[in-house]
Image (tube, rainbow, N blue to C red):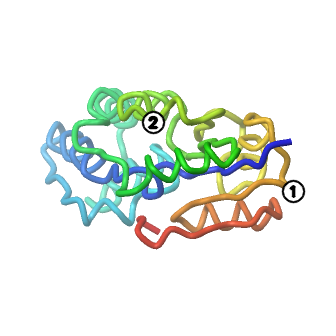
Amino acid sequence: MRRVAIFDLDGTLVDSAPDLAAALSRLMAARGLPGFAREDVIPMIGDGARVLVERAFAARGLAPDADALPAFLSDYEANAAVATRPFPGIPEALAALDAAGWALAVCTNKPEGAARDLLADLRLAPAFAAILGGDSLPVRKPDPRHLLGAIAAAGGEPARAAMVGDHANDMLAAAAARVPALFCTWGYG
């Protein structure tokens, strides 16, 4: 059985903060509220789109309205690759792992459709045997079953897998799944 490297997406593989901040700013502007700078959004990233929108509204002293999440997702998914780019060295690292016989997968709390579209737009999708989003299973990180599901979807087993991420959720999921983890200090966590 092949070794499997499971990657988080936002803050690990790609710098998505500029497009997330832009989409949140457009969401706020549509409601007559001030937008966000990139650095304001970074601490909000990591727990999925619903929590991101909740945190953005909380930063404005409000709760999100019923249309906020669908409006955000629609806008963000259409504009997710405007300024988002892989972190330096990521495409080369993925190619080197593939050449060394590793299967690669993504385990992100971002909705699966948005993750797939973003990876396709950035021409990274072909590198991955599996892509699981925050809505792919009934659980998401830090629940270890999300990570274990990604390992299984990539054709691997936990004893021959490693998690690569930038957030506490990645490290907690890996620890609970008893999978070694590498923490990316360049990310958002």
- The N terminus sits in image quarter: top right
Q: Quadrant of residue 177?
A: bottom right
Rendering quarter of residue 168:
bottom right
Q: Amino acid at mark 1?
A: Ala
Question: Where residue 39 sits: x, y (%)?
Answer: 25, 66
Mark 2: which secondary structure?
A: loop
Toward which corner of the image does residue 103 lie, by quadrant?
top right
Residue 189 on image: x %, y %: 47, 69
Residue 4, horizontal then vertical, whole percent: 73, 48
User: Which residue occupies 69% across, 46% down?
Assistant: 102
Please state the horizontal and vertical placement of residue 133, each as a whole percent of the image: 58, 38
Label 1, residues with CA under 10 Å away: few <14, some 14-19, many ≥20: few
Query: Does 158 sit left or right of 58 as displayed?
Result: right
Instruction: Please say if 149 is above or below 97.
Output: above
Tell me the element at label 1. Answer: helix
In the image, is 121 to the left or to the right of 164? left
Q: Nearer the viewer, residue 106 or 138?
A: 106
Question: Is residue 157 rendered to the left or right of residue 92?
Answer: right
- Residue 58 in the image: above or below residue 130: below
Image point 37% across, 55% down: which residue? Answer: 87
Residue placed furthest toward the bottom: 185
Residue type, mark 2 in image: Leu
Residue that numbered label 2 is attached to: 124
Reading the chain from its start, which is encountered first: label 2 or label 1? 2
Write the residue at 56% across / 46% down.
Answer: 108
Please tell me how crowded label 2 is: few (under 14), some (14-19), or many (20+) other residues with Cα within 10 Å: some
* Tag 1 residue: 159
- The residues tagged by marks 2 and 1 sit, at their Cα atoms, a distance apart of 26 Å
Horizontal side of 154 relative to 20 (left or right) equals right
Q: Residue at x 61, y 43 (%)?
A: 98
Question: Residue placed farthest to the front in the image?
Answer: 99
Disc on res. 101: none
